[in-house]
Amino acid sequence: MNRKTAFLAMIGGHALADYPLQGDFLAKGKSRNAPIPGCPWWQLLSAHAAIHGLFVGVITKRPILGVVEAIIHAITDDAKCRGRISYNQDQAVHIVCKAVWAVLSKDKAP
């Protein structure tokens, strides 16, 4: 997969993972400021971030990029939930990460 296609696929995966696959439960429960009783916020944040990491790892065929994506995604979303960055800043970080992963995911020589 070329870089442009990988980037577009990751943007599509991001849209799926951040909206329909996240749902109201994860969106609300991942915040340490207003957790859902009985559901540790960090578990829900980790689950959400893992979904993003899975998309990146599969699309780039580089599992390490999926792991790094999950970590950065969790840190970024936590900062947003804590009011340290805005929604638009959160989304900008996610998109920039996808661009970096696309550059790092160039096909290996056959």
Image (cartoon, rainbow, N blue to C red):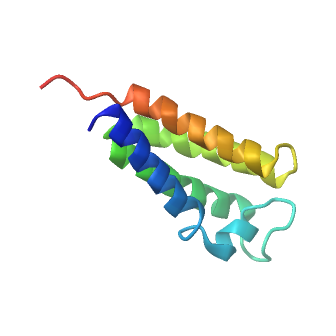
Relative to 101, residue 30 above or below: below
- Give the farthest residue toward the left: 110
Number of marks in the image?
Answer: 0
For the C terminus, the quadrant is top left
Q: Is residue 95 above or below residue 80?
A: above
Q: Is residue 35 above or below residue 80?
A: below
Q: Residue furthest top?
A: 109
Point out residue 87 in the picture as x, y percentages from the top left corner: 77, 51
Quadrant assignment, res 105: top left
Give me the residue at 44% from left, 36% from top.
Answer: 65
Taking the spot 35% from the left edge, 46% from the top edge, the residue there is: 59
- Counting from the top left corner in percent of width and height, residue 89 is at 75, 42
Asked if one can make out residue 68 in the rendered structure from this viewpoint, the answer is no
Left or right of 5 on screen, residue 87:
right
Residue 21, position in %: x, y?
Answer: 53, 69
The image position of residue 102, as x and y in percent, is 42, 33
Left or right: residue 50 compared with residue 54: right
The image shows residue 108, relative to residue 22, as above or below, that is above
In-front residue for pair 47/9: 9
Identified at 86% across, 43% down, the residue is 84
Is residue 50 in view? yes
Residue name at image x 51 percent, y 38 percent: 98
Q: Quadrant of the N terminus?
A: top left
